[in-house]
Amino acid sequence: MSILHIASWYPNPWDSIEGNFIRDQIRVFSQELPAETVVVQVRPSARRWPWFKYTKLEGGARGYFLLIPNWPKRIIEWLSTLLLVIVLLKERAWRFDALHVHIAYPLLMHSRLWRWIVRKPIIISEHWSAYHFNFHLPERSKALARMRRPFQQGYPVLAVSKALLNDIRNFAETDDFMDFVVPNVVPLHGYRQETKLAYENGPVLFSVNRWAEIKNPMPMLQGLERAAANGYYFDFVVGGFGPMMDEMISFIESSELKGRTRRTGKMTKSEIAIQLSKSDGYLFSSNYETFSIACAEALGAGVPLVGPRIPVIANYAGPKGLLEVSARTPEDWQNAVQDFIEKWRRGCWDQAAIAQRAASQFSVEAISSSYIAAMQKIGLMSASAKPNGQ
């Protein structure tokens, strides 16, 4: 069987890290089934008039981009459908045995109008935590009804966690589709004792994200400041970007954190790996996650986590890899940070064991096995197929 992977998010000339988790998953999937990849995206830009660009992307993917002014979402949805249909015709999509669409919105908003052109099975892969919040749309809105449609067509769904599958069922108001858990690809750097900095007074704490409102960083920063004012020493490295970044920087610059915080801005994968190798704790502050590659990657480097209880993270981190913040308040963050530092001083964190546990959960072989099992049940692989190398 051969698969045409279709993505809207993918590293591109305008953003080298956009959708890198999708690119990584497609790479693993393509090792098990012959596949090609196209990226189809209608992308807002500063241009006054629409402009089309075709380009080759990482991994041999072919990128089809329509750059437009900042038009309403409804127009973007229809343009995405039109561009996708053109790409399917140009790529002769009927050559493939199935279309695997990575993230339903916006590419599958109007699939019922065009799927007869190709007449091949459609599979959806999903990653978004926004399903948990119904994309913050009013319950009876037309926009919400439109976004539910792809999951009401009966397409099989591959999601990165059980939590996300449950969110999608609740969001779509149906469970009339096959569903499978296939975890994200997690960079596994391993624990490297030789790179740890020889701090005697306190640990290096690290956090990186696209800082949006759902990441809820301010109570974390306030808790860190309270711990610092209470005499606890640590160095804090914060990376990333996003709409909350200005508020975060303003707080850091006017607080006890100013002298002990280093800001890195947007970070590449290699920069994150280097920083994890020098870090003693990884902080996350989200209101909700469906997986969190960042947390799983930290564990894969042997770095224990500090953050609020999020079931999917607590499940894969376990009590030996996570110190939970009781509630999302500055006071509870202060207590958790201080508790973490005390345990760090006593050598309570077995970082080598943390890395080993993460490697067993998130290896490429484990992800391949989950993918193969899904494809077998869908009917796109034989029952005897095994991951490559096994």
Image: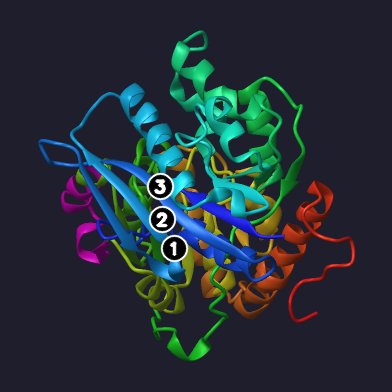
Q: Residue furthest top?
A: 140
User: Does residue 82 appear left or right of residue 244 in this picture?
Assistant: right
Q: Residue at x 46, y 10 (%)?
A: 141
| Badge 3 amino acid | Val
Q: Does residue 23 sit above or below 331 in this rendering? A: below
Q: How many marks?
A: 3
C-alpha span from label 2 to label 1: 9 Å
Task: Look at the numbered discs 2 and 1 and tell me whether their residues touch, using CB distance below 8 Å.
Answer: yes
Give the secondary structure at mark 2. Answer: loop
Query: Whole-percent x and y of residue 183?
Result: 65, 56
Q: Residue furthest bottom?
A: 194
Q: Reply yes or no: does residue 68 show up in magenta.
A: no
Q: Which residue is mark 3?
A: 40
| Badge 1 amino acid | Ala
Q: Which residue is mark 2?
A: 10
| Badge 2 amino acid | Tyr
Q: Which residues are magenta?
A: 247-265
Q: Residue at x 44, y 63 (%)?
A: 61
